[in-house]
């Protein structure tokens, strides 16, 4: 990194890395991000590698790249998941690395700003939104948790038009500042950030009639 003056990058993690080296690069990418402040995004996703670097510059701590995966039982809830390279500042409870090299753990409850970015024929675009990670545990596979976004259908529609299924989460609700920073660097932001209620209010509403099995509660 230092010799080549590299600040961030992306790796072709599967299946080639595992095929040739015998393990996944997830733990190495997590350590690079968390300890060196030099993110390595998954799946050759250089756009979100840039957003992970932005997380350090704007919050002073590591961001995390996740999938917008499987809408939940409620239209404002989705499962945030990756195989994963999730840094420890985003995890709670027991954290482990499996034999394949992936980081395993539950994502901690937190307010976050999400950025889903991609290049298109029309330029470099990014959807910015606010959300909260919730306290209900989800599948133990990889790193995962349930996320609430107050205007999730609109966010998904925007991402479908100018993004991919990845997003980077930054700690805190700083959507306006993130959108301004992106625009300053020539990236076209779609700022869909909205106020998010307190965690207790969100959970009281979305879990009241949740007819899905949970594995517990995280803190």
Image (cartoon, helix red, strand yellow):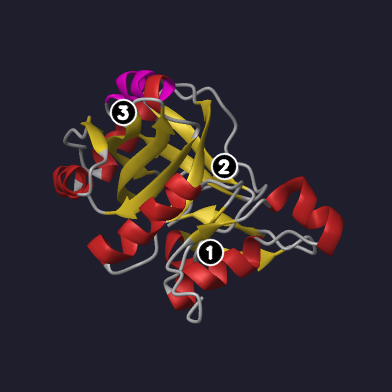
Of the image marks 1 and 3, the number of the one nearer the N terminus: 1
Q: Describe the element under mark 1 as helix, strand or loop.
A: strand
Residue with the mark numbered 3: 205
Which mark is nearer the camera, 1 or 3? 1
Mark 2 or mark 3: name the one nearer the start of the chain. 2
* Residue sitting at x 27%, y 28%: 150
Locate residue 118: give its quadrant.
top left
Q: Which residue does the image show at 53% across and 64% down from the upper left?
A: 93
Q: Name the residue under label 2.
A: 138
Tell us which disc is closer to us: 2 or 3: 2
Q: What stretch is highlighted in magenta?
A: 151-160
* Label 2 – label 1 distance at C-alpha: 13 Å
Q: In this view, does 34 lie above or below 123?
A: below
Q: Which residue is drawn at 28% across and 24% down?
A: 151
Q: Is residue 165 left or right of residue 20?
A: left
Q: Where is residue 44 in the image (x, y as percent from the top left)?
A: 58, 48
What element does badge 2 sit on?
loop
Is-magenta flag for residue 156? yes
Mark sitting earlier along the chain (2/1): 1
Q: Which of 13 and 208 is in front in this view?
A: 13
Where on the picture, by quarter, is residue 160?
Answer: top left
In three-dimensional space, the C-alpha distance between marks 2 and 3, rounded to whole angstroms, equals: 18 Å
Which residue has dot 1 on it?
Answer: 93
**Residue 129 at x, y = what percent?**
27, 36
Residue 193 appears in the figure: yes
Q: x, y percentage for residue 119?
A: 41, 34
**Which quadrant of the rendered structure holds the C terminus?**
bottom left
Measure the C-alpha gap from mark 1 to mark 3.
25 Å
């Amino acid at each position: 990194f230092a010799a080549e003056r590299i600040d961030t990058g992306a790796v072709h993690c599967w299946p080639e890395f595992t095929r040739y080296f015998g393990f996944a690069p997830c733990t190495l990418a997590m350590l690079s991000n968390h300890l060196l402040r030099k993110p390595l995004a998954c799946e050759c996703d250089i756009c979100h590698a840039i957003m992970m670097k932005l997380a350090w510059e704007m919050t002073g701590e590591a961001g995390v790249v996740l999938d917008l995966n499987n809408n939940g039982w409620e239209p404002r809830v989705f499962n945030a998941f990756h195989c994963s390279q999730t840094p420890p500042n985003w995890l709670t409870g027991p954290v482990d690395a499996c034999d394949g090299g992936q980081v395993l753990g539950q994502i901690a409850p937190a307010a976050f700003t999400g950025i889903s970015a991609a290049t298109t024929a029309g330029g470099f675009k990014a959807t910015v939104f606010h959300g909260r990670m919730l306290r209900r545990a989800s599948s133990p596979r990889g790193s995962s948790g349930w996320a609430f976004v107050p205007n999730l259908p609109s966010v998904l529609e925007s991402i479908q038009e100018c993004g991919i299924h990845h997003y980077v989460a930054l700690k805190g609700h700083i959507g306006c500042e993130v959108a301004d920073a992106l625009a300053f660097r020539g990236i076209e932001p779609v700022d869909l950030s909205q106020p998010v209620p307190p965690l207790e209010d969100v959970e009281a509403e979305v879990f009241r009639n949740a007819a899905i099995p949970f594995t517990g509660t995280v803190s």
